[in-house]
Image: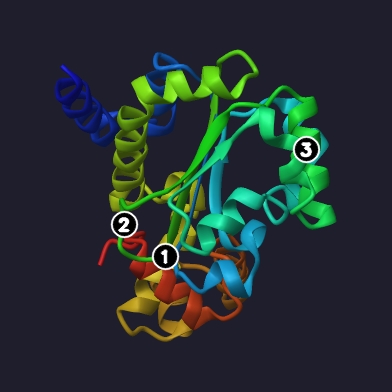
Amino acid sequence: MRSDLLLDLAEALHTDPDPLARFRDFAADHGVKGFFYGFSAFRSDVGELGYTAGLFHHHTYSPEWEREIGVGALIDNDHSITAMDHGQRMVEWLPDEIGPFLATLPAAQRRQFETEHELGMTCGASLLLDGNPLGFSGMGLWIDTPPETAAFRRHWAGEGELLTAASNLLDVAVRGDRTNLLVRLSPREIDCLSWLARGLRPAEICWRLKISEKTFEKHIASAKKKLKSRTRDQALAKAVLLQLLPL
């Protein structure tokens, strides 16, 4: 029965126009109150750019969480991402161990941890995903159980294996051919990068697309920002790696 659920989910994630919403509904049916999914194009991005700047991400946490944590640095101070960045496969959110655990965290991570607990995010798990061999992929699952470690552990014993597999299926689906759901390149930005990848010079691209060089540079600058890249060549490399271009 569980394998049937995963087979159905895998098909749905590859065919649904919004696989993130489909995953949200599936996860909710198995006790997930909210999730945070993020990936980087290059493994080095999370170290060189930081987690907020280096990850493409999507979450279904509460507006209060986004307001309190702040979009500008909402994951740089997440202790679970730091742990996964150093190879830990799973980080549990354990309410009964908050006191001793907090003493081990740097001040910025401790403040975020305390804020999340004040918002009720006391039980859950963060997972290092295996869905793609390149870059970094992680999932945070806020589990809807009573705020007790024992309650979370009972729930995870029954649903954890399924939710871990489902999280990896989402990673495969999004990073396979749906990465633009999170990168959000415009059609014109994709056109400009595609012609660059084929070896055309900017002037030739402008002639083909019937745009000015100023407009071309505007599209490239926007694409660089969305692709979290410092240079045109890096943006192009990421766009190719993430299969965003119709080459």
The amino acid beneath tag 2 is Asn
The amino acid beneath tag 1 is Gly
- Which numbered mark, 3 or 2, is in the foreground of this view? 3
Question: Does residue 33 appear left or right of residue 134 in this picture?
Answer: right
- Which numbered mark, 1 or 3, is in the foreground of this view? 3
Residue at the image point whose x is 73% and y is 36% from the top: 98
Assess whether mark 1 and mark 2 are in contact (beta carbons under 8 angstroms).
yes
Q: Is residue 176 visible?
A: yes
Label 3: which residue? Answer: 99
Give x and y (percent) for residue 149.
58, 24
The numbered mark, 3 or 2, whose residue comes first in the sequence reads 3
Give x and y (percent) for residue 38.
51, 49
Give x and y (percent) for residue 60.
58, 29
Label 1: which residue? Answer: 135
Q: Is residue 70 visible?
A: no
Q: Above or below — where is 42 with respect to 162?
A: below
Label 3, secondary structure: give it. helix
Label 2: which residue? Answer: 132
The amino acid beneath tag 3 is Gly
Q: CA distance from mark 3 to mark 2?
A: 36 Å
Residue at the image point whose x is 51% and y is 74% from the top: 44
Q: CA distance from mark 1 to mark 3?
A: 33 Å
The numbered mark, 1 or 3, whose residue comes first in the sequence reads 3
Residue at the image point whose x is 40% and y is 17% from the top: 30
Label 1 CA crowd tier, 10 Å (few <14, some 14–19, many 20+): some
* Residue closer to the observer: 1 or 243: 1
